[in-house]
Amino acid sequence: MPDSTPGDATATPAVAPYRRPADDAHPPLLYPDYRSTVLRAPSRPLRLLPHTLTEVTGPVLGEGRLGELDHDLTRQHDGQPLGERIVVHGRVLEGDGRPVPHTLVEIWQANSCGRYLHDLDRHPAPIDPNFTGVGRTMTDAEGRYRFVTVKPGAYPWRNHENAWRAAHIHFSLFGRAFVQRLVTQMYFPGDPLFFQDPIYNAVTDTRGREAMVSRFDLSQTVPEWALAYHFDIVLTGRDATPLDEDH
Amino acid sequence: MALPLTPSQTVGPYFSIGLHWEDGPFAVAEGTDGAVWLRGRVTDGAGDPVPDAVVESWQADPSGHFAHPDDPRGVAEGFRGFARAPTSPDGEFAILTVKPGPVPGPGGALQAPHIDLSVFARGLLNRVVTRVYFADEPGANAGDPILQEIPGDERGTLLAEPTDDGYRFDVRLQGEDETVFFAV
């Protein structure tokens, strides 16, 4: 096969790089307290990838992928799921506070008993026939999203003696660029299990750990119906320095 | 002023309930001209397959254009450029795609055809990112500013080898022949 021929470079869009996260912004890949990292974390240091057009673009997906009730995990079956009904809402932002509009937000979680609807989840807690635990939505023009769900239960795992995961909801985000892709977990305020959860504690920066904890939000509760939690998600943003300036 | 970034966390063992898309592995529709299967196996530091990983790909179309609002050049019709494929019990993933064209790179240099790959898994507290280049593009690869920065003995881990129905690209998370991973 011959080498590819060069494309038309004249119409090339400008490439403004994104800010690099601080070293402790994300957890280290090797964190032995979380046992599964030991054989899966790369041993060599990561190489710095310049932000080229491939990295500053990324999948802009969502429209056409969403069903009408994808954002409401309490209405995806004939009956209502058991558990404490909650609204989970917030904004997807960049580090400078700019919203990320019209971006796909995907969530998945255990049911109120701490059981996932997954073949390999052997936790002997009941499956709820009225709860799948999967949600999707798009942020609006101001970066806002909103889900209705039930509060997930804590569940045991085999990482260490009598290990329990703090209750959490998994979040998956794309932003607008490959470099902004993020999968994280939202926690609940005051969870007594934080101290022994190595996934949560792998984030060494206190502000970072706090950034994963939602806050109770009385203003968005629905009287006689649901409690509410607020969770903003902050993705890395563009570098403030104009690209085309000579240095 | 600057808000703290939301830290990454593992996708955990049960991501497949949330990240499953029927059309996930198809960066292009079946029957697309020039479509190839990009197949590979994800293995850990013991050489064992990783059966609970999900691989995501992002790439340009055969003209080197991206399906993105910041690329005004336009893409091939129906081209999405993104795929998401879970690994099977033996650690294998498969993505149907087309070979991308060369993409503008740093300092006006052209980059060789490449695909950005993210791997998520239980035990990965953050995704790992690598790049798929193509072993049958020696000329373009020799001029690629990013590939040429990689020491010769590690460079091979970034080269997808031609197969009967496309290309093979194994991902070794750790250990001998460890794949080159990038910080983005």
Image (cartoon, coloured by chain):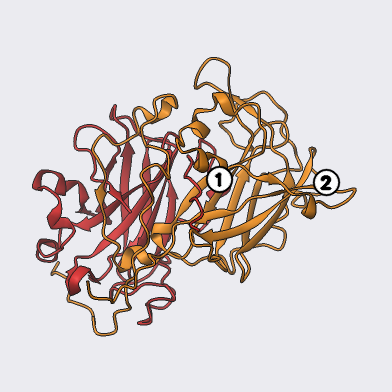
Chain colours: A orange, B red
Q: Chain of mark 2?
A: A
Q: Amino acid at mark 2?
A: Gly
User: In terms of secondary structure, where does tag 2 sit?
Assistant: loop
B175 w.r.t. B179: above or below: above
Q: Residue furthest top?
A: A161
Nearest to the eye among marks 2 and 1: give it. Answer: 1
Q: Amino acid at mark 1?
A: Ala
Q: Is residue B55 left or right of residue A190?
A: left
Q: Residue furthest bottom?
A: A10
Crowding around mark 1 (Cα neighbors within 10 Å: few <14, some 14 to 19, many 20+) is many
Residue A79 shows which numbered tag?
A: 2
The image shows residue B42 at horizontal and vertical percentages of 33, 40
The image shows residue A67 at horizontal and vertical percentages of 67, 62
- Residue at image point 79% right, 54% down: A219
- Residue at image point 42% right, 28% down: A36
Disc 1 designates what residue?
A211
Residue B33 shows which numbered tag?
A: none
A210 w.r.t. A65: above or below: above
Q: Are marks 2 and 1 on the same chain?
A: yes
Q: Is residue A170 visible?
A: yes
Q: Is residue A214 left or right of residue A238?
A: right
The image shows residue A117 at horizontal and vertical percentages of 64, 38
The mark nearer the N terminus, 2 or 1, is 2
Q: Residue furthest right?
A: A224
Closer to the camera in the image, A14 or B41: A14
Closer to the camera in the image, B102 or A186: A186
Give me the C-alpha separation between circle 2 and circle 1. 34 Å
Q: Is residue A97 left or right of residue A238?
A: right
Q: Chain of mark 1?
A: A
B102 w.r.t. A151: above or below: below
User: In terms of secondary structure, where does tag 1 sit?
Assistant: helix
